[in-house]
Image (spheres, rainbow, N blue to C red):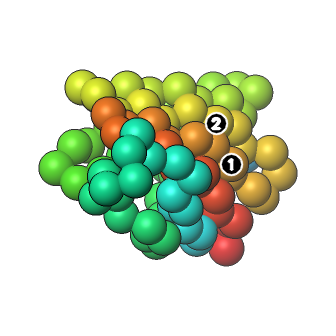
Amino acid sequence: MRNLFAAVAAVSLTSLALAASPFDGQYQGNIHLTSAARAQTPCPHDTPFNPKIVDSTFMFHWNQTEVPTKVGPDGSFNATNGNVNLKGKVVGNSLDGTLTGPLCIYNVTAKKR
């Protein structure tokens, strides 16, 4: 019985390890303003960006908007909620993308820690 329990536990742990995507992990980076609709537009400038990807998914928070974001098998993502769009790609340990809002456009970068 003890051997059966050990075998089931080993299979369960192996299954969990296989379920994780290669993109999963904690990332650390920033969001950098690249353009604004008008010079007087109040766009935040550099903002920390520290997503945690779990099962190829992360929640992106921008102002009062939450954008659930799914990373595809090739590392690409494209998510929209209301007038906020986040699209880009994870390659190796780097996440790069573009955040587009109603008046501002940002470059999004992060590295896996």
Q: Nearer the viewer, residue 43 or 24?
A: 43
Q: Which amino acid does label 1 sit on?
A: Asp
Reply above or below: 49 against 84: below
113 and 49: which is toward the camera: 49
| Relative depth, front residue between 38 and 22 | 38
- Which residue is painted at 40% across and 40% down in the image? 37
Instruction: Residue under label 1, please give it.
Output: 96
Identify the residue at image location x=23%, y=54%: 63
71 left or right of 65?
A: right
User: From where the camera sits, is residue 7 visible?
Assistant: no
Instruction: Tell me if label 1 and label 2 are in contact, CB under 8 Å.
Output: yes
Q: Which of the 4 image quadrants contains residue 81?
A: top left
Q: Callout 2: 10 Å neighbours few (<14), some, many (20+)?
A: some
User: Measured from the top left, where is residue 59 in percent x and y?
Assistant: 36, 46
Which part of the image, by quadrant, shows the C terminus? bottom right
- Residue 85 lies, in percent from the top left, at 42, 31
Numbered disc total: 2
Q: What element carries label 2?
A: strand
Q: In this view, does 76 lie to the left or right of 26?
A: right
Secondary structure of residue under mark 1: strand
Residue 8, horizontal then vertical, whole percent: 56, 45
Q: Residue furthest front?
A: 39
Residue beneath the point at 58% across and 41% down: 98
Residue 6: percent from left, percent from top: 60, 57
Please, which residue is most extreme toward the right here?
A: 92
Q: Name the residue under label 2.
A: 88
The residues bearing labels 1 and 2 have C-alpha atoms spaced at a distance of 6 Å
The tag earlier along the polypeptide, 1 or 2, is: 2
Residue sitting nearer the eye, 88 or 92:
88
The label on residue 107 is none
